Amino acid sequence: MAEKMRIGILGGGIAGVVAARELSNDPDLEIELVEKADRLGGLQRSMEVNGAWYDIGAFVFDREHQLLRTFPELYEIFVMVDHSNKAIKPGGGLDYYPMTLHGYARENGVTGLAIAALDLAYCKMRYWKRDDLIAYIKYYIGGTIYERSGLRSYIQRFYRTGDDTIDLEFGRQRLPGIRNECSLRNNARKIVSRIFQRDFADQHWRCYVRPPEGFDRVYSTIGDILGARGVTIRAGREIRSITRRGDQFDVRFDDSERLSYDRIISTIPIATALDYIGRPIERDLEYMSLNSLFYRFRGEPGYDSAILYNFTHDGDWKRITNFSHYYGLNRGDSYFSVESTIRAGETRTLEEERDSFERHISRFPLLRGQLDYQGGRITPNAYPFFRRGDTERIGAARARLVEFGLELVGRQGTFAYSTAHQTAENAVAMAGMIRATKEPG
């Protein structure tokens, strides 16, 4: 009987578990999933605070989401909801996220809309090369809309820096829809028909969210599924080094245990993987950390969407996620999280973020009532930061790992700003490629 090919998967986030499930379909493969934390889930996690579950981040899943397609058992525990996103605009009004033409006209007037249209025509000529982030965005929506809609402020708030220091790669990865949704050629008829519409019914959609018990239940279920399919899960294991002997990879752990694999899939941060193989880079790739503040609230929210973005020109917070919109009140209270980001080297505390949010939100007719802070959490390595001019350096860092023989997938593993659905799709594609080749090394 031929010996099975051993595959090690580093990281138990969405990319890791999807790859493990897909590879487990092949009886000729032996799969081990190694996770530093004591639980699966990666950045998809929830925290229970005083009886309410808060997510670190905001996650919705349409019916065709690749995580659900890979683990169809999750349909039974996920919750179907009516979902919508809104944003506070620079003038203080609310609009659907990121914007509607009707909402823009309501805040800037018909004259302002006409000026924006003329500016867009100019930007189509001025920025046709689309060779940096600002030119890329202005070509598709114009400089006037970019500024007055609050999109520019949101991007700068997200990365805590000027948009002239952010690489074009951010626009390509984070704003792929801008090319399709804002193309005059593709949308001229739609744009004209919508200018004078009221709010659009299609801004709401039916989708899934995790079960009321949080992502712990999701990934506990996933762990059970993987275990039943023969996948070995090694959680709570700290890697010390990865070396290569011909076609074999040796992974040594902090307790000196050593395991050997024929192939390794890495979904962990690139800089961490480079440290493991002994090829560190001179300057780490930069990630944004995520601040999450948790609140209970009793009163009138002042908005009716599940998620509310901050598109004003000030305020440090970027998004509110109202979990009671999905799961109902908790002991009579709404409960939600407030998110902001911090860059490496910043020293802002959760209390400072709390004070900043509460002072800013008090200026608007929102959250009028009893607002009770429940605590918070700082999550490192939440979002990749694409510094202008770093694209080649990021590519070179990836190339070092590929040259060593690791196979990369996932937001962390490839330093890419991909959605959870895209991440899972990429993991499926990689698993398919491995199953098709099945050659060690």
Image (cartoon, rainbow, N blue to C red):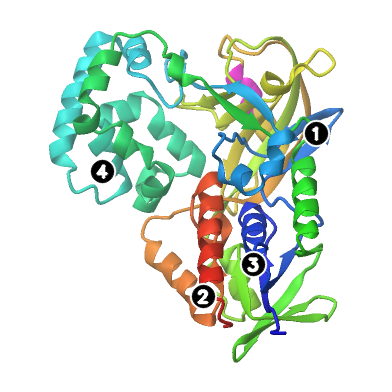
| Quarter holding residue 54 | top right
| Residue numbers of the magenta segment | 356-361
For the residues labelled 3 and 1, say whether their Cβ atoms are less than 8 Å apart: no
Looking at the picture, how far across and down is residue 415, in whole percent?
51, 59
- Determine which quarter of the picture holds residue 174: top left
Q: Quadrant of the C terminus?
A: bottom right
Mark 2 closeness class: few <14, some 14–19, many ≥20 residues within 10 Å:
few
Circle 2 is placed at which residue position? 437
Residue at x 51%, y 19% (from the top left corner): 204
Amino acid at pointer 4 = Ala
Q: CA distance from mark 4 to mark 2?
A: 42 Å
Lower sequence index among marks 4 and 2: 4
Q: Which residue is mark 4?
A: 135
Quarter containing the N terminus:
bottom right
Residue farthest to the bottom?
A: 246
Q: CA distance from mark 1 to mark 2?
A: 40 Å
> Decide: marks 4, 2 in contact (CB < 8 A)?
no
Q: Is residue 406 above or below residue 133?
A: below
Apparent side of residue 153 relative to residue 123 in the rendered image (left or right): right
Q: Residue 26: which disc? A: 3
Q: Residues within 10 Å of mark 3 (few under 14, many from 20)?
A: few
Q: Considering only order in the chain, which callout, 2 or 1, is on the residue closer to the N terminus?
A: 1
Q: Is residue 131 visible?
A: yes
Give the answer, above or below, for where 163 lies relative to 236.
Answer: above
Q: Which residue is under mark 1?
A: 213
| Residue 233 placement (x, y as % from top left) | 78, 63
Q: Secondary structure at mark 3?
A: loop
Q: Report helix, strand or loop for mark 2.
A: helix
Gap between marks 1 and 4, in whole Å? 44 Å
Q: What amino acid is labelled 3 in the image?
A: Asp
Task: Check contact, mark 3 vs mark 4: CB within 8 A.
Answer: no
